[in-house]
Image (cartoon, helix red, strand yellow):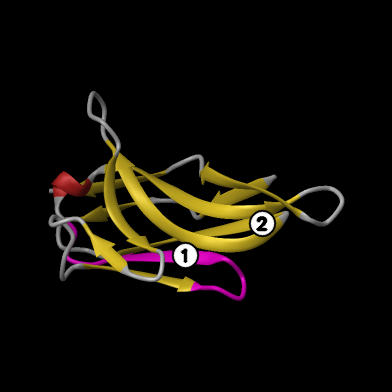
Amino acid sequence: QVQLVESEGGLVQDGGSLRLSCAASGSIFSNNGMGWYRQTRGKQRELVATSDGTTTYADSGKSRFTISRDNAFNVVYLQMNSLKPEATALYYCHANMDTLSSYGVYSRREDNWGPGSRVTVSS
């Protein structure tokens, strides 16, 4: 079992900055990658940025968003600068983890999602 705890989102003005964080805990054998996705009402969840040995950004966030990880603590951050109103969304943390069983041996690979952090950018 892996749990993801996200920081609160926030309300920022057009052009402002916000940093999201997400910490994974539980029976983690290895961390294969973490990232951020976002979703607005009526739309599918879309990639924002991922880090799994390589870093990938959606075109919408390139040069303005930075993803980083603290592998020792299984934490992923998303620094968002020069935010625009169209970035308003619910931001979800994602983690792909190999987990341990209750016997302390490898169990399985899991995809886990955080509960979502609401980010609102006002114009």
User: Visible in this render: residue 9?
Assistant: yes
- Occupied quadrant, residue 83: bottom left
Q: Is residue 93 magenta?
A: no
Q: In this rendering, would 48 be left or right of 29? A: left
Query: Label 1's element?
Result: strand
Q: Nearer the viewer, residue 3 or 9?
A: 3
Residue 56 x, y percent position in the rendering: 26, 63
Q: Earlier in the sequence, mark 1 or mark 2?
A: 2
Residue 82, position as x, y percentages in the image: 16, 65
Q: Which mark is residue 76?
A: 1
Residue found at x 18% / y 68%: 64
Q: In the drawing, what numbered circle is on residue 25?
A: 2
User: What is the x, y in percent for residue 41?
Assistant: 26, 27
Would you say 33 lies left or right of 103 here? Answer: left
76 drawn magenta:
yes
Residue at 40% over, 51% down: 9
Task: Estimate the spatial distance between the alpha carbons at disc 1 and disc 2, rounded to whole Å.
Answer: 12 Å
Secondary element type, mark 2: strand
- Number of numbered callouts drawn: 2
At label 2, the amino acid type is: Ser
Q: Which quadrant of the figure contains the N terminus?
A: top right
Looking at this view, is 1 or 75 the one in front?
1
Q: Which residues are magenta?
A: 70-83
Q: Quadrant of residue 63?
A: bottom left
Taking the spot 53% from the left edge, 44% from the top edge, the residue there is 112
> Which is more toward the observer, 4 or 82?
4
In this rendered view, identify the residue nearer to me: 70 or 119.
Answer: 70
Q: Which mark is residue 49?
A: none
Type of the residue with mark 1:
Val
